[in-house]
Image (cartoon, helix red, strand yellow):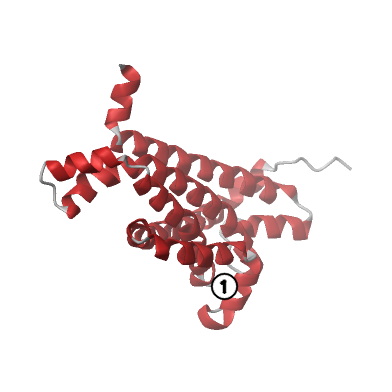
Amino acid sequence: MAEEPLVRWDWIGRNWPNIQGLLMDHVVMALVPVVIGLLIALPLGLAGARWRWLYQPTVGVMNVIYSLPSLAVFIVLIPITGLATRETVMVPLTFYAMAVLIPAVVDGLTSVPDHVRQSAVAMGFTPLRRLLRVELPIAVPVVLAGLRVAAVSSISLVSVGALVGRGGLGYLFIDGWQRQFYTPIVVGIVLTVALAAVADLLLVLAQRLLTPWSRARRTA
């Protein structure tokens, strides 16, 4: 009997529509929590940078949540959000993203030199204008570094959701393992790594677009 090949290309061809559906489901469940986490982390990070007494308790709570095993959190949420629903996976991933992004926002804002802030004040900038035109642009590299970590982590953790019925490409891991058939596992790994690489590359390009002065400095 011929040995089973590692990848059965005919299986991939027959199941490609289903694989595409799992890939799109994976993208939604991975990236939507990161976007929501960023929208929540920005005001919390601004508050933490403004009032330092608020920062430590907030980060402490986020670190406790981040340390919880993702599978355990998924299972706890099942009675609330339902079995095999996107919400069961996306809610914990949103908190995980916040745990990474809140410190990134605070670190980015506190990295702004004092003399830059003082120059903006001397030029008559209002606090809001100083934030939007001076502080946030300078903080962009640090915030995007945190965003890259959050995005890649979220893409990886979505697969765990397959154990509670909704894990995007993670379904391929479960299916391949149960049948001792390696092609779905290989496809799932390759697509997950490719998705993480594409997300990271897009964020790097976004940083280059949002910080044109850094490119000009390197060129000079």
Residue 29 visible in the shown view: no
Q: Which residue is mark 1?
A: 84
From this view, report whether residue 40 is shown above or below residue 153: below
Q: Which residue is situated farthest in the left direction here? A: 124
Q: Quadrant of the N terminus?
A: top right
Q: SS class of the residue under badge 1?
A: loop
Residue 158 place in picture, x, y as percent: 56, 59
Q: Quadrant of the C terminus?
A: top left
Left or right: where 64 falls relative to 178: left
Residue 70 place in picture, x, y as percent: 62, 65
Please identify the quarter of the rendering in which residue 213 is found. Answer: top left
User: Nearest the camera: 110 or 8?
Assistant: 110
Residue 32 visible in the shown view: yes
Residue at 61% x, 69% y is: 165
Q: Which residue is situated farthest in the bottom direction here? A: 79
Residue 84 place in picture, x, y as percent: 57, 72
Residue at 39% x, 51% y is: 105
User: Nearest the camera: 201 or 117?
Assistant: 117
Q: Residues within 10 Å of mark 1 (few under 14, many from 20)?
A: some
User: Nearest the camera: 29 or 108?
Assistant: 108
